[in-house]
Structures are given as structure tokens and as C-alpha cells.
Image (cartoon, rainbow, N blue to C red):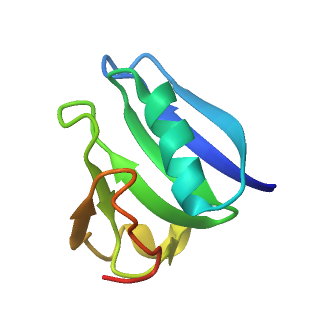
């Protein structure tokens, strides 16, 4: 098992929560993360790399960066790949 982190931002702006997820791989982590999102903005992290994010306004639709990005480069770039958990999206492939 590998440790991933889910950052959950409440839709009403009330706060942010960081949740540890133990998963076999990134696909498994996406499935676990989707179950915990519950109408909030969420980001899935592997250490200091954001793997995907999902907005409260588009549940079950993950936005995947063209390559895993570090926290410092999130502000500088956009996201290009879009997919749902379970689509077999290979992290790091655009």
C-alpha cells in the first residue's frame, strides 16, 4: 500500500481538510477519493505532487494535469486531461 493525500475544500468555504488515503496505486486512490468528496472541491496528492482534482460543481469528473505537478507549479499552469475515476487514466499521461 502507498500513502496518498486528499485535500478537501468545503463548497461553502468553511474550511480545508487533509485526509490520508492508503491505496495500492493511483487508480485505487482515485476511487477512494471520489467516495469521500461529497460535494466538495478535492485534490488528490502523492506526496508533493498533485495527481488530479475534482470540483464540487462537476462530481465524478477528475481533471488530470498533463504530467504530475508539484505544488509550486500548480499556479503556473493549467490542466488539460479530463477523465473519470476508473477510466484507466495513467497518471502523467496527457
Please state, as top left, top right, bottom left or bottom right, where the C terminus lies in the image. bottom left
Pinpoint residue 5: horizontal percent, then vertical percent: 65, 47
Residue 23 lies left or right of residue 89; in this view the side is right
x and y percentages locating residue 7 in the rendered image: 54, 40
**Above-or-below relation of 71 to 28:** below
Q: Is residue 41 above or below residue 45?
A: above
Q: Is residue 36 left or right of residue 39?
A: right
Q: Position of residue 69 (x, y in %)?
A: 48, 75
Look at the picture and state if 84 lies above or below 81. above
For the view shown, which residue lies furthest in the right direction?
Answer: 1
Q: Which of the 4 image quarters holds residue 40? A: top left
Quadrant including the N terminus: bottom right
Q: Residue furthest toward the left?
A: 57
Residue at left offset 49%, top offset 33%: 8
Q: Which residue is pictured at 43% across the width and 16% down the height? A: 14
Q: Is residue 28 left or right of residue 77?
A: right
Residue for point 40% across, 65% down:
88
Amino acid at each position: 500500500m502507498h500513502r496518498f493525500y486528499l485535500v478537501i475544500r468545503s463548497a461553502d468555504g468553511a474550511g480545508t481538510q487533509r485526509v490520508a488515503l492508503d491505496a495500492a496505486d493511483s487508480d485505487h486512490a482515485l476511487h477512494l477519493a471520489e467516495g469521500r468528496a461529497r460535494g466538495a472541491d478535492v485534490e488528490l496528492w502523492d506526496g508533493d505532487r498533485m495527481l488530479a482534482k475534482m470540483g464540487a460543481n462537476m462530481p465524478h469528473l477528475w481533471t488530470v494535469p498533463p504530467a504530475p505537478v508539484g505544488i509550486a507549479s500548480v499556479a503556473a499552469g493549467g490542466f488539460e486531461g479530463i477523465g473519470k475515476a476508473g477510466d484507466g487514466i495513467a497518471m502523467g499521461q496527457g
